[in-house]
Amino acid sequence: MTTQAARLSGPPPEPGRESFVTRLRRRNWFPYLMTVPAVIVVVAVVIYPMAYSLFVSFTPFHLLRPDTTSQFVVDNMFDNYARLARDDVFWRALWNTILFMVVTVNTSVLIGFGLAMMLARMTFAMGPVRVLLMIPMMFAPVLIGFQFAWFFNATVGLVNNALLTLGFISEPVAWLVDEPSGMISLMLASIWMTVPVVTIVLLAGRLSLSDELYDAASVDGASVYQRMRHITLPQMRPFFVIVMVLLSLDIARAYDIVRIMTDGGPAHRTELIWTYAGQLAIRGSQFGLASAMSMTGVVLGVVFTFILFRQMMGLRKDMG
Amino acid sequence: MRDSKSMSRRLALPMAAALAVTALGAGTALAQDEPAYAGLDMDLSGTTIKMAAIGGGNYEAMYDSISMFEEETGADVEIVFLGDGFEIDRYLKTNYAAGTVDFDVAWNHTSFMSQFTNFVEPLQDYFTEEELAAFSPSIIDAATIDGNLQLIPRHADISALYYRTDLYGDEALQAAFEEQYGYPLEVPTTLDQIYEHSEFFVGEGAILYGTEFAGQEEAVAGRFYELLFANGGDYFDADLSPIFDSEAGIASAQWMRDLYANGLVPPDTPNLLWDGVAANWCNGDVAVYLEWYGWYGYFQDPESCPEVAGNFGMARGPVGMDAETHTGWAGAHAFSVAKDSENKEAAVQLVKFLTSEAVSFDESNTFGFLPVRSDVSERVVAANADTGNPLDAERWELANLQVSEDFRTPPLFADWISFTNEWYPTLQSIILGDVSVEDGLAKGVADAADLLDSLGY
């Protein structure tokens, strides 16, 4: 370096004491720049709408009176949340949603695990059976809703016709009206939709396990139950967690099924957070109140996801 | 808020007068001149007109005539949305509110129009006085809010009593009924009689369901409303305070609840809408119920409804506790032009065509919708004078009577739909027996007051 250049650039930094600006200049920014498009999309599609929804939840926004979004008054900003807290239907919908998620996710995992174990032991026709099992995945949730709505229709439905013909019932049953058959019908439709995904993931998990473990267990005289209890279940635990995380995040797709089959009714008997929010927003035009409800749905989703991700982090630790 | 009863009379009397005049003048030689089309006098080549329309039932048949409009004007008409009344209401609301209007012509309705006033183009300047004079003055008047004409009516409808003539004419059933109930089995004229007849027919195994009603959305709220006013009550007073927890409200809700609890209506009643109740009637599963005139043509078609075609009659709606007030929930479907439309002139031409004398006559004469044009009323009465089925002609006399005496629209305020969406789940709770009638009505009134307060009423 020339004397003039050295003078202009200032004294060389002491080792380990570079300036912030220098550190910024030295950093390789290319990887960060590559994420900018994704960040823009996430901000535009997720962050901004959620932030706007949060703002709207503090206003008396009415869908057909756009000027109501500007009626933000600090003293009244929690009015929508206060109304929700007083609303029996909201608490019923919240309870229904938690019940729906817990039963659907756990039942899907149980059935999917059973099917995966059966498929893993099959020595012939495994391909065609897998294809048959995947059929529900080919249907959009809306179509599944229509299908099961017809199945459970009180007058012309397949279920009632079969039961009446076989003599198990003497009068049509209003499956989608009565309690608890309404919720059960929705859960059955949702389980039918999600079991194939669970089966495929758990089958992959089972097939990835080393046969040597089972051979060694057989040599030691372990029973089928003992092999399941001490080899299969512990080894497949990561796959169970993955599947439960996926289902919990994806369960919101069941909105389509509920919307078509019962629309949250009758009399809010099958109301979920999402259907009630939709009803308030679109039919009742009460967007502010619906946004407040959506925020509670977000909190619910975050809580479930947090619990399950902690499970995953724990697994990663266990597995080193 | 306009008083719904006085508003209904303003709508009904001129319509009835039009029907009466045309009934008297049915002998004029109408056959010599063909009904006229309108809206075909402008070259619209290269223009695409988009329409959000009501679908389902008999509503869609009219749209077949659009091909003629396209041929004559050179325009291209695209139906961007087709759904039942509740689906299209949601579609329009979300698009209007979000500013994503992608249609020029939109469905409208006298019960729904108050909420769309900010989003539809005032039409009074697009029509001449002569053109507007062809329509029911009362509907045009009612649809003019603050000097702006919101819509052009397509057809009107009012609920009438449909009953199975084979059941009511069966001598064995007549004898058995009179023995059990102490009065002759005749077409019911009161709500109590409808209940007793339903109980009898189902008890005798003569029919699956005695009666039925649509059990969700505005459909059940509106049906409750007509029971309410037949029983001498109303939803709101002049100050828009909810008052339906009255004695009339209790009687109306109890009637619906007792029918459901005793298995006299379909078990999935809370899930039924218009198509569902029409299907049950068409299948021959119902003895008597309240239904719109617009289903008449479908029910009389032996290919569509072989069980009931030629096998039913129509009568005036029953009275309730108020022995002088009959049921008669009514309204008019219509077309509007979206304020955000970029093809307003072309859209108006399409509306003129779809509400022209020829297209309206075809729809009314084929399906039974009540005409909203005096020229169409005249033609329909003449066309049905001698078809071989007496009911084809009798129903127009009945329509005249109902329109003049019983025509009643729901309360016309902007948040009628928001109110019904808030109220109907509670009404379902009452019908299903989840809550007592009194508690359910009290909750309904409290929720309605809370809602209207939050909306600034």
Image: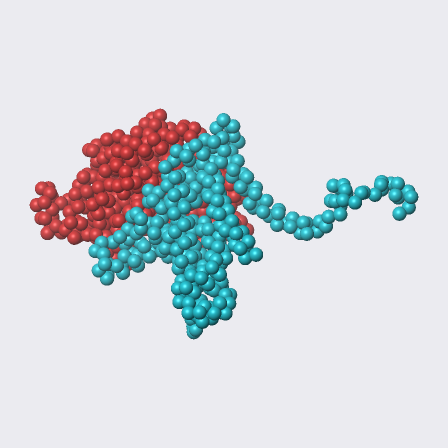
Chain colours: A cyan, B red
- Corner quadrant of residue B16: top left
Q: Residue at x 46, y 40 (%)?
A: A296
The residue sitting at the bottom extreme is: A124
Of B254 and B395, which appears nearest the observer?
A: B254
Quadrant of the snapshot with the C terminus of chain B: top left
Does residue A204 appear left or right of residue A6 in this picture? left
Q: Considering only vertical position in the picture, is B436 above or below A196?
A: above
The residue sitting at the left extreme is: B179
| Residue B360 visible, this angle | no
Q: Considering only vertical position in the picture, is B439 above or below B368?
A: above
- Corner quadrant of residue A21: top right
Q: Considering only vertical position in the picture, is B237 above or below A285?
A: above
Q: Residue at x 26, y 33 (%)?
A: B438
Q: Position of residue B106 (x, y in %)?
A: 45, 44
Q: Position of residue A304 (x, y in %)?
A: 47, 47
Of A105 and B453, which appears nearest the observer?
A: A105
How many marks on residues? 0
Q: Position of residue B433 (x, y in %)?
A: 26, 41
Q: Considering only vertical position in the picture, is A246 above or below B191?
A: below
Quadrant of the snapshot with the N terminus of chain B: top left
Q: Residue at x 40, y 66 (%)?
A: A224
Q: Residue at x 55, y 45 (%)?
A: A46
| Residue A224 visible, this angle | yes
Of A153 and B57, which appears nearest the observer?
A: A153
